[in-house]
Amino acid sequence: MPLTALPTPAALVDEARLMHNIHHMQQRLQSLGVRLRPHVKTAKCLAVAERQRAAGAVGITVSTLKEAEVFFEAGERDIHYAVGIAPGKLEAVRALRERGCDLIVLVDSLAAAQAVSAHGRAHNHRFAVMIEVDTDGHRAGIPPEDDLLVAVGRALHEGGATLRGVMTHAGASYECRSLEALRAMAEQERSRCVRAAARLRAAGLPCPEVSVGSTPTALFAVSLEGVTEVRAGVYVFHDLVMLGLGVCRADEIALSVLGTVIGHQAHKGWALVDAGWMAMSRDRGTQDQPQDCGYGTVCDERGVPIPGLIMSGANQEHGILAWRDAQAAQAGGDLLHRLPLGALVRILPNHACATAAQFGHYEVLMAAGTLQRWPRFNGW
Amino acid sequence: MPLTALPTPAALVDEARLMHNIHHMQQRLQSLGVRLRPHVKTAKCLAVAERQRAAGAVGITVSTLKEAEVFFEAGERDIHYAVGIAPGKLEAVRALRERGCDLIVLVDSLAAAQAVSAHGRAHNHRFAVMIEVDTDGHRAGIPPEDDLLVAVGRALHEGGATLRGVMTHAGASYECRSLEALRAMAEQERSRCVRAAARLRAAGLPCPEVSVGSTPTALFAVSLEGVTEVRAGVYVFHDLVMLGLGVCRADEIALSVLGTVIGHQAHKGWALVDAGWMAMSRDRGTQDQPQDCGYGTVCDERGVPIPGLIMSGANQEHGILAWRDAQAAQAGGDLLHRLPLGALVRILPNHACATAAQFGHYEVLMAAGTLQRWPRFNGW
């Protein structure tokens, strides 16, 4: 593998692992009887989304209008914009819908429902809308018990919008500390979202879709009864946060940052690499996990983990590689000789979404052993 | 100011503050008798660098070869690549130099000095090299007391490279907790770098340049005797880390993220905005300062700070705005009414370099009251 030909730092994707992750999630959700609507915010890459679709995914989830626009241009029609809609964005949403994109927007308040309905009536346009349900107290949404849920549904349905259903994201799954807790969170996400759908239906409102999801809950749900689709994103790459949660194995992490050793501070046991936080991102998602991985854990050039070696510090274009503790240092030996000037390393990221976003393209190690460059996009 | 016309999130630059910061630093260093070689890694923007040059800056500092290439294409010839050189990058450095770019590289080891010299001899090329000096134990470089310093100088000088001088970056200035500590750190940076130069000269080696710098030390140095140039970057925008250090005032922070309120969790006292960590970056640089600002502090649409309101949490495209404490909440009142759905806010960032890097362009509020769009670039 001609990795030495790549300028560093580079975002390296292992295609075999990527395909494994895509098929694993797809098969799991198929066996649970629900559709998978991948969240493209992780990879922001047409080549990755094509592989998800080929494996059986239906539609996509986006976190920005830019994602909706780019994927629509590439032929995708079925798009769920899973961030509460700002009224100022309705014009851009409508423009996409009028070009044939079935772009669904999200609301969790009367004010937003009324803004969507009013904009639709003013422009003789029927928006497709889902209501965000709060199933874990994590961020946004309306609790299924709150009467506001039905009021929002009514404001949409009677205001001239198409009520597509309910959606939730159990972001609190990232704070689970056991597999039992993950299973319980998945069931909580499912049951509370299904309950919200039942309330809307009992009030005579349409609610065809019940959309749930996060990578941890998607991989740990035992039943998805009542759910129609699952949204998940980071599973394509996985990362150290998922590893720390017990959601993936280390050899399922498909994204790493390729860096080059540029120096040493031998008396401190440091090697310095040309991948700093600009390459890794500032995400310290493992900081609050039992095993803090600094800015990432280090593998050799072939991708084999070097036990106990982490990126312990980062500046913009400098990463500091150091042994996690004295035991690791003793077992691992002298970095000056083990990783001499010019040596390549692969650094596994805390959070794939954040690390990938630092790059304009991926260098993809194809299963066949060749290299391909896949563009990704950023911005809004 | 037609901010409502901007898609959010946006990286908003206040041109009047930018120009104030540029002139303030330039005048300060001129009065201390040294050149300013701005670090373009913060803004990565030709329009910003043009203003620095027009104010009197000489040459630029870069953190990546991409920066060197972009600024060289735009006409800059005098470029210092201030990250230890990886041998694999020497070919690209040589290509730029052979096109007329005076691109200076940096080494802090015999291995790197020998690699540079060997590559130069093999291709009949004279590289221009500086030696990195460790003045604060922060990251890289050779302590001035270490005999390695002279050995590296000799390996370069006798190996066929041009020894341009010594450079240091007192990154530890970011950990100073008083103005006295900042002044002491600036003097430590100066005196130890000057001492390294003196050692090289005493050994009969050339050392024309003595280059020091970080924004805090540049703004707090009392004397720069023996120094020829100062490098600084973040001063163009400043940020909450600089504010926390006492290095700038709040009304000197020239970069903010413009966001739109997309919802509320009224019972928690939250407003949610469409600027999450993808816009702010994951930088939590104020976390270890006396005043932790979360992911940023919040100003209203006009840029007036809302006392005690911070971005307390962030997901990829969601920011959670909340009062810092009960006192701020009591004084500030109800966010649901103060920042209703659709309201615009400006969020001051922890670390301007990291936040700016999340964007492909700046929306610049010109001193004249109009808006301009200035492109920036990212990647390697």
Image (cartoon, coloured by chain):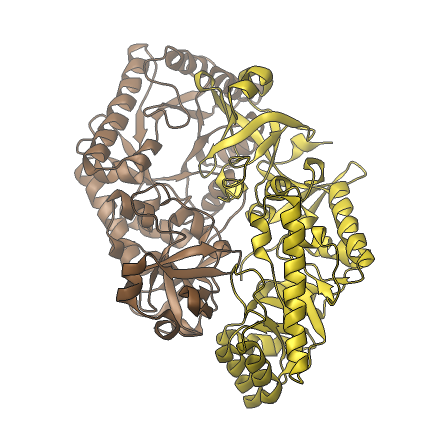
Chain colours: A yellow, B brown
Residue A216: x, y in percent? 65, 50
Q: Report the front residue among A114 and A348.
A: A114
Q: Report the front residue among A321 and B158.
A: A321
Q: Residue at x 45, y 39 (%)?
A: A316
Q: Is B206 situated above or below B313?
A: above
Q: Is A98 situated above or below B72?
A: below
Q: Residue at x 32, y 20 (%)?
A: B207
Q: Report the front residue among A324 and A321.
A: A324
Residue A238 visible = no
Q: Is A202 situated above or below B345?
A: below
Left or right: A332 as drawn, with respect to B373: right
The quarter of the picture where the N terminus of chain B appears is bottom left
Residue B62: x, y in percent? 43, 39
Q: Quadrant of residue A74?
A: bottom right
Residue B344 visible = yes
Residue A194: x, y in percent? 68, 69
The quarter of the picture where the C terminus of chain B appears is top right
Count the numbered circles shown.
Answer: 0
Q: Quadrant of residue A67?
A: bottom right
Q: Residue at x 54, y 80 (%)?
A: A113
Q: Is A148 situated above or below B143?
A: below
Q: Quadrant of residue A104?
A: bottom right
Left or right: A368 as drawn, with respect to A83: right
Residue A283: x, y in percent? 51, 44
